[in-house]
Each structure stands twice: as C-alpha cells, then as structure tokens.
Image (cartoon, rainbow, N blue to C red):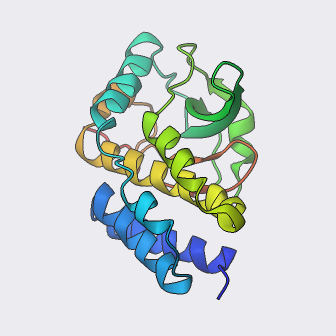
Amino acid sequence: MEFSYEGSWTALEEILGKREGIAASWEALIDFHAQIKPAAYWSALRNVDFTEERAEMADWLHELAETYPLPESVQALWIGIVQFYDEEQRRTIYAYHVLGADAYDPQDAEWATEPTWQPELGHFVPDSLKMLNSALAEAKEDFSFLDWLLPVAASAFVFDNIIQTQLDHSKFRVANMPLPVTIGYDNGDFISLSPIVAS
C-alpha cells in the first residue's frame, strides 16, 4: 500500500489531540505508517529521541520573550520550520524561528507573513531533526513523503508538550488571551498547538 497525504495528516491531528506525550505520540505515528507500509527503515526512525532537547528549547523560548517582550497587540504565535544547506557539513539542516502577528486565522497561515514581533536571537537548530534526517536517508523511495510529514509531526509533539509542561506562560502575556500557537513550514503545511493561557 501507499501512503495518503490526507490520511497521514488526519492521523497526526488525532494523535496530537490526545496529548499523550512526545515519545508515545511519536510511537503512535510510526505505528500508523508501519502498518500501511512495513519497512526496515522504521526501526531507525523509532530510535530518534525528541525528548532530550525539550528543556533547552523551553529555555530558548523564554529567552526570546524576556529579551524581546511581546507587544500587547500580538494575536498569535508562529513557530516556523525552515531548511538551509550547511556548506561545511554538506547537508540540509532544519531550524526553528518564532514570530508573532496582530492577526490570526486558524485555517490560513497568511497572517504569519506580516509579523509584528520578530525576535532577533536567530534560529534554534535541533539535533533531533538532524538525527531524523539521517534516519530518513534509509527510506529512499519514501523519503519525499516522510521528509514532508515527520519533521513537522515531531516538532508539533515537542512544542505542544513544552507549552503544556515547561513553558512559563506569564512571559507571553498579551492583551487577548489565550494566545494561539501554530507550527509549520514557512512555505507549506501547518498545525495548531495548545494555546498559551493566562497565568
């Protein structure tokens, strides 16, 4: 059988909605796809650990908010996933950046193209997505599909968990709470995370 873009995205939304933690959510997503198309490469993908950098990523978010306080007018946050080519390592690297905007539409990410809060601390380059990229090399004919789905899925599981368990929501207080948070590719698909709430 072949993978279905719509079916896989629906599975991602359902798994994320259960909020069962990073490792359990990742395992569930891999199980869903391994049942559709059994393959040897699933073992390497199962072994990628997305939990180790959680505290460092939370610290990065806190530093952004402390160094560049959010304007009261911000209506939503966008966590963007970008790719760039590292000439020294001769490989594609994933990175995150965060911005805020004074508009929000849960169905259309166009609002994120006009940010009013754009911290200048640069990008966060997660080692876990480097490991995922290496594991994906084994997928070969399925690489394109999995390279679209798995980075955003893993990132959603991690950041959603951070928002729920480690983020100091008071550092992100704005006029209108709760504050929606969306994660996705800057030029592609996206998914809503748990909101930041007043605390």
How many marks are shown on the rendered structure? 0
Q: Position of residue 111 (x, y in %)?
A: 70, 42
Q: Position of residue 122 (x, y in %)?
A: 57, 17
Pick the front one: 32 or 108: 32
Pick the front one: 189 or 66: 189
Q: Position of residue 37 (x, y in %)?
A: 56, 82
Residue occupying image coordinates x 39% and y 51%: 48
Judged left or right of residue 168, residue 41 is right
Above-or-below relation of 63 to 154: above
Asked if one can make out residue 182 in the rendered structure from this viewpoint, the answer is no
Residue 175, quarter of picture: top left
Residue occupying image coordinates x 65% and y 53%: 105
Residue 162, quarter of picture: top left
Residue 60, quarter of picture: top left
Q: Quadrant of the N terminus?
A: bottom right
Judged left or right of residue 143, residue 170 is left
Pick the front one: 119 or 41: 41
Asked if one can make out residue 55 in the rendered structure from this viewpoint, the answer is yes
Pick the front one: 153 or 98: 153
Q: Position of residue 123 (x, y in %)?
A: 55, 23
Above-or-below relation of 11 to 115: below
Q: Quadrant of the C terminus?
A: top left
Residue occupying image coordinates x 67% and y 79%: 4
